[in-house]
């Protein structure tokens, strides 16, 4: 054991009655270094992190060969001893400070708590410390921010406040559990920078993440977790640059950024043509633009006057191609998607579907042409009727909403499930009893049931684990090839958009700031915002 | 992310809020008056006869004519309606049929007793509910069985039955407390407990749930990771989260107390709006019924507005939206 | 604790099974319901005496082996009267609940489906009804319509309606704004198809739960009105009427109000426990 080893964990096992969730993991963190625990949901990485602070819960059974922090053992501590470790020796940062800071208390009081509990500072000294901490984590106006609550701060600011509360007592080790998940790319970059600077100042950092790009940027060492075990660990460059374990290879392959359009991300063999009876050949030869948006503008009334969600947006979706629409949250992507789907009419400008008006007409006129355009959403579960089984959902989509006798369209259902790579047994289950990936496949099958020519994909893989995301993206790619579909593909994830799109439009505050061929946008961006976005976007960098 | 747009903006918003509450209250009072006025006219029967004690009273034609003139019943319906509205605006609620006294002064005498009863019950219910929620969050299984038992009591036990059991136990068997109103503070204990217990069960359930949510939430985990004790998590975080739905429900709770006061005041022979309403209903004394309905509707609207304000003060998330 | 719940959630099927397990209170509630059903169907088989037979010599007897719940002022057996009272009492509760939910369905659907103007109108009406909370609305209605078993039943239905209407309206609006309705529009469904296939079935599925929970409340409120002397008059063998008769003798013959009241408590508790159980199973 080297002298600067801060945290040493040997053979840590955590169980909750029904078999262990963490199975004998060993790792160490050095001062001024970052170890990343990487894995997908259910891999046991979060439980590991909580066990290190004695917060795995009353029902947890924790055992370890050794668990040492700065030379002192963390095994069999009393509650009081644990409390002297928490905050003081180990700082803890969770994801999404909106709920990880008490929404009813001011940020200042939350940070002050640690000082009040573990120091003998006077009230005014603590107050000064709080302001200094807020300043140190890069808050613009500490005095103002200290009096605000998490709900009044932007995502980036509240994450900084959460970090400030974790480092208030200068802990030697920080455990950060998905600290940047759900943040926009530019904000994520800023928060990572903050963590980096803490690490460089000598704090040990244990980073829990599912995102290999984030890990590659900040961690010196990586431990890959799967099914409660560490399957591979070592220096970041070695593990990510030359993975030995099959699971690590699969995980790396699944990351879309860096994989050019058309390459497969998942290991799964998927050949639509081999298994499925394809739908009828195209009844309408797609040539030229299938969907055009001309000068779309949409405003919404708010308490402070009109808010322009979409401002003079124009684009064209060419037949058989994918147009990627990329932007951070609040950029107006979803409003554009709703106008493209004919769910909202623009205040100004028009949408044309196959050259004919699609906006500014009645729903009745639209209905006949609705089968031409389908949609896949980020959260498929909420788009399903919870009372229906998968079979009923698909039958409803095939039959055009007419009431049909039981058992009708059984062949269609089988064909659709086959097409999206789902076994026929799924048909009788409710969407709630499916995994996230299966649900999204059902959503794709439903979108394809009316044999559309265009599919609008709104963040279709954003809430899925990387390997599942890879499968869903591969499926969409394959279906496009086989069926000649056109995609309007909306995402905040530049890697995903780059992998999926032929053309890309970058949105910022309701405007398209830049659009063009995918390669051109990603290799030679012209607009400063695009450049900033690309700069901030986490990439797998292996130095 | 919402920033206050200056003091003038906040003032304007407050004025708008006040105006909308005021107009809402006026509307509710008008609607209650109108519904009762036309409702009573849709029922067959002679109002004048009702005033003299119903069809059984065999009132003379002269007496009936006199009553019709006295109460303006000989005028056209529309004139009667607008006459009543006009008097109402001036604060005149008319005269009680049965007691031959101005309704307004009758209600003025009865209102304080009911308000005392309702406010004390609300306070006791809050204390018991918060205590239960805290206890079951801290002490685990045994405590949560007791509190969920009381929740079912809150939903299932009628006031009259609870009152009877309490009287049996504390007045007749133990002789500790008077079974009926004596005018002393002792006499308030059983009525207040009768009203408060079921309400406490209900509030306790809501508070317990949100307290449990708070103690298992990510922010509580953050607090523990900052070396906060379980007691600290409870008192500095969870308690406020538990109180918020309680505050939001207090307007409704007050209404249910006023409704419960009818039964409780009757059993314990206490003066108050509830008992007045019951005797007015039994005697079909419409002006008195209208008066009680208006006063309790007004009280309800006021309390709702108060609980609205309290919720805004307690919960910054409501303020922001 | 948070960790524990998080881990549990990851094991598919486990949470739902835990929620489907029948609890001890639910079993007790089931037993109460079975007993009540038996009392409604075959009162004579359960009751040892004629509920209306007068025997003044036996008046005001406390509970004994012969008269389990004692006797009333005319010497009638309270236990037998309680058993025979189940049928009319539960009928009143059921009819009142049906009236309340029926009204609420109309108001809630109008508000939820009928557009902005109707929603506003129904909203104001509900506000007015809410301003006379609980029994007050029922009492005002009785003041207008006169006392009696029919008006008090209607009055209870009327005063429960606003609460139900608000739940139903909220449910419809929630489903209306959900992803499933948007998905159906994108699939080209007509408004009517969406209302029929998605909106109504999803919005109205909690009505069954509401009705189960509401039955207990209706029985409690109807009996409160009877207790106040505004419902079925004595000497009918109905729980409310028995309460009204017993009220005069509260301090001398407590069993006259205690036992009929106890059955009201059992009924309401059973309906609450079962309703909550249904609710919990539907959420998952």
Image: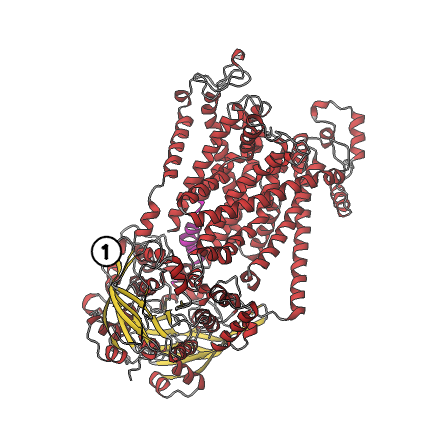
In the picture provided, is B87 more to the left or to the right than A308?
Answer: right
Q: Nearer the viewer, residue A167 or B291?
A: A167
From the top left corner, tell me how far across and down residue A348 is, in percent. 52, 75
Residue C203 included in the magenta stretch of the image: yes
Nearer to me, B264 or A352: B264
Chain of the residue under label 1: A
For the C terminus of chain A, which image quadrant? bottom left
- For disc 1, the neighbor class at 10 Å (few under 14, some 14 to 19, many from 20) is few
Q: Split into 4 quadrants, where in the image is the N terminus of chain A?
A: bottom left
Q: Residue at x 50, y 38 (%)?
A: C217
Tell me which residue sits at (19%, 66%) in the image.
Answer: A275
Residue marked by disc 1: A425
The dominant secondary structure in magenta is: helix
In the picture, residue A148 is in which quadrant?
A: bottom right
Indicate the position of residue C212 as horizontal and vertical percent values.
Answer: 44, 40
SS assignment at label 1? helix
For the residue pair A262 and B91, the one nearer the viewer reads as B91
Q: Position of residue A487 (x, y in %)?
A: 34, 74
- Reply above or below: A199 against A520: above
Q: Name the one closer to the observer, B187 or A267.
A: B187
Range shown magenta:
C187-208
Tell me if C135 is positioned left or right of A113 in this view: right
Name the quadrant containing residue A89: bottom left
Residue A465 in view, yes or no: yes
Q: Is residue C137 visible?
A: no
Decide if residue C117 is on the left or right side of residue A477: right
Instruction: Describe the colour scheme in one phrase.
Output: secondary structure
- Please check the rendered image and state whether residue C76 is part of the magenta-colored stretch, yes or no: no
* Residue visible at 46% across and 57% down in the picture: B233
């Amino acid at each position: 054991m080297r002298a600067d080893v801060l945290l040493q964990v040997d053979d840590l096992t955590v169980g909750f009655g029904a078999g262990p969730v963490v199975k004998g993991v060993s790792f160490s963190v050095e001062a001024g270094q970052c170890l990343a625990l990487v894995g997908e949901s259910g891999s046991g990485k979060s439980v590991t992190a909580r066990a290190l602070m004695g917060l795995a819960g009353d029902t947890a059974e924790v055992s370890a060969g050794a668990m040492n922090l700065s030379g002192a053992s963390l095994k069999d501590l009393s509650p009081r001893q644990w409390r002297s470790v928490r905050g003081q020796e180990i700082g803890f940062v969770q994801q999404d400070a909106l709920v990880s800071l008490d929404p009813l208390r001011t940020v200042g009081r939350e940070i002050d708590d640690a000082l009040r509990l573990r120091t003998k500072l006077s009230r005014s000294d603590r107050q000064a410390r709080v302001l200094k901490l807020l300043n140190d984590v890069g808050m613009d106006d500490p005095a103002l921010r200290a009096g605000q609550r998490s709900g009044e701060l932007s995502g980036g600011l509240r994450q900084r406040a959460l970090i400030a509360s974790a480092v208030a007592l200068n802990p030697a080790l920080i455990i950060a559990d998905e600290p940047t998940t759900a943040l926009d790319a530019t904000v994520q970059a800023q928060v990572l920078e903050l963590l980096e600077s803490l690490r460089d100042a000598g704090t040990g950092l244990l980073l829990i993440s599912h995102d290999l790009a984030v890990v590659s940027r900040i961690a010196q060492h990586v431990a890959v977790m799967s099914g409660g075990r560490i399957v591979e660990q070592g220096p970041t460059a070695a593990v990510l640059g030359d993975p030995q374990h099959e699971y690590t290879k699969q995980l790396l392959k699944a990351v879309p950024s860096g994989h050019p359009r058309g390459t497969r991300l998942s290991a799964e063999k998927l050949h639509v043509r081999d298994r499925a009876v394809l739908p009828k050949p195209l009844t309408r030869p797609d040539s030229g633009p299938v969907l055009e948006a001309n000068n779309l503008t949409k405003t919404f009334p708010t308490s402070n006057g009109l808010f322009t969600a979409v401002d003079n947006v124009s684009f064209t979706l060419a037949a058989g191609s994918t147009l990627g629409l990329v932007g951070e949250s609040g950029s107006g992507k979803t409003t554009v998607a709703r106008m493209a789907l004919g769910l909202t009419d623009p205040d100004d400008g028009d949408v044309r579907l196959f050259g004919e008006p699609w906006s500014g007409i009645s729903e009745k006129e639209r209905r006949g042409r609705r089968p031409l355009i389908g949609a896949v959403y980020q959260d498929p579960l909420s788009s399903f009727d919870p009372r229906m089984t998968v079979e009923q959902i698909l039958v409803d989509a095939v039959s055009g909403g007419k009431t049909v006798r039981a058992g009708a369209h059984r062949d269609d259902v089988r064909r659709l499930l086959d097409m999206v790579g789902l076994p026929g047994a799924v048909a009788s289950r409710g969407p709630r009893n499916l995994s996230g990936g299966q649900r999204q496949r059902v959503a794709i099958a439903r979108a394809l049931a009316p044999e559309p020519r265009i599919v609008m994909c709104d963040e279709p893989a954003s809430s899925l684990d990387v390997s599942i995301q890879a499968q869903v993206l591969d499926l969409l790619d394959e279906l496009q090839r086989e069926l000649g579909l056109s995609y309007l593909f909306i995402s905040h994830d530049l890697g995903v958009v780059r992998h999926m799109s032929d053309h890309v439009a970058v949105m910022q505050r309701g405007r398209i700031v830049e659009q063009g061929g995918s390669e051109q946008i990603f290799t030679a961006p012209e607009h400063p915002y695009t450049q900033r976005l690309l700069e901030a976007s986490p990439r797998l960098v292996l130095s | 992310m919402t920033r206050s747009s200056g003091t003038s903006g906040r003032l304007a918003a407050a004025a708008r809020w006040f105006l909308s509450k005021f107009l809402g209250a006026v509307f509710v009072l008008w609607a209650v008056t109108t519904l009762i006025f036309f409702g009573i006219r849709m029922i067959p029967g002679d109002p004048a006869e009702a005033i003299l004690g119903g069809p059984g009273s065999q009132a003379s034609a002269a007496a009936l004519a006199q009553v019709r003139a006295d109460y303006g019943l000989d005028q056209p319906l529309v004139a009667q309606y607008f006459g009543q509205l006009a008097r109402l605006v001036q604060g005149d609620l008319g005269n009680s049929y049965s007691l031959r006294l101005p309704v307004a002064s009758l209600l003025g005498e009865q209102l304080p007793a009911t308000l005392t009863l309702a406010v004390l019950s609300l306070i006791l219910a809050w204390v018991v509910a918060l205590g239960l929620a805290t206890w079951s969050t801290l002490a685990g299984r045994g405590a949560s069985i007791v509190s969920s038992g009381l929740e079912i009591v809150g939903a299932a036990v009628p006031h009259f039955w609870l009152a009877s059991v309490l009287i049996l136990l504390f007045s007749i068997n133990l002789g500790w407390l008077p079974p009926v109103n004596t005018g002393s503070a002792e006499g308030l204990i059983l009525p207040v407990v009768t009203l408060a217990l079921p309400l406490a069960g209900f509030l306790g359930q809501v508070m317990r749930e949100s307290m449990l949510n708070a103690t298992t939430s990510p922010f509580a985990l953050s607090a523990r990771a900052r070396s906060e004790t379980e007691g600290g998590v409870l008192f500095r975080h969870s308690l406020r989260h538990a109180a918020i739905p309680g505050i939001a429900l207090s307007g409704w709770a007050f209404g249910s107390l006023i409704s419960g006061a009818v039964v409780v005041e009757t059993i314990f022979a206490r003066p108050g709006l509830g008992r007045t309403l019951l005797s007015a209903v039994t005697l079909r004394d419409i002006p008195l019924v209208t008066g009680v309905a208006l006063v309790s509707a007004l009280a309800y609207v006021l309390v709702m507005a108060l609980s609205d304000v309290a919720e805004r003060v307690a919960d910054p998330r409501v303020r922001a939206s | 604790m948070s960790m524990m719940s998080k881990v549990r959630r990851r094991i598919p099927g486990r949470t739902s099974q835990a929620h489907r397990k029948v609890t001890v209170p639910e079993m007790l509630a089931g037993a109460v319901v079975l007993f009540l059903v038996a009392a409604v169907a075959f009162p004579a088989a359960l009751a040892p005496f004629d509920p209306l037979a007068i025997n003044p010599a036996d008046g005001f007897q406390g509970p004994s082996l012969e008269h389990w719940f004692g006797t009333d002022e005319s010497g009638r057996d309270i236990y037998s009267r309680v058993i025979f009272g189940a049928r009319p009492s539960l009928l009143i509760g059921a009819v009142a609940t049906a009236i309340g939910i029926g009204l609420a369905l109309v108001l809630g659907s109008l508000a939820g489906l009928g557009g902005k103007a109707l929603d506003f109108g129904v909203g104001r009406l509900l506000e007015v009804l809410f301003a006379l909370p609980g029994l007050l609305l029922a009492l005002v209605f009785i003041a207008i319509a006169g006392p009696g078993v029919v008006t008090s039943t209607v009055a209870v239905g009327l005063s429960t309606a606003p609460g139900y209407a608000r739940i139903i309206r909220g449910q419809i609006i929630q489903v209306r704004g959900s992803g499933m309705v948007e998905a159906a529009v994108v699939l080209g469904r007509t408004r009517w198809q969406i209302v029929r296939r998605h909106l109504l079935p999803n919005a109205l599925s909690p009505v069954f739960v509401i009705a189960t929970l509401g039955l207990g409340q209706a029985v409690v409120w109807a009996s409160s009105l009877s207790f106040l002397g505004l419902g079925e008059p004595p000497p009918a063998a109905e729980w409310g009427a028995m309460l009204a008769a017993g009220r005069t003798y509260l301090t001398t013959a407590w069993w006259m109000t205690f036992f009929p009241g106890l059955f009201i408590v059992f009924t309401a508790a059973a309906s609450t426990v079962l309703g909550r159980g249904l609710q919990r199973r539907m959420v998952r």
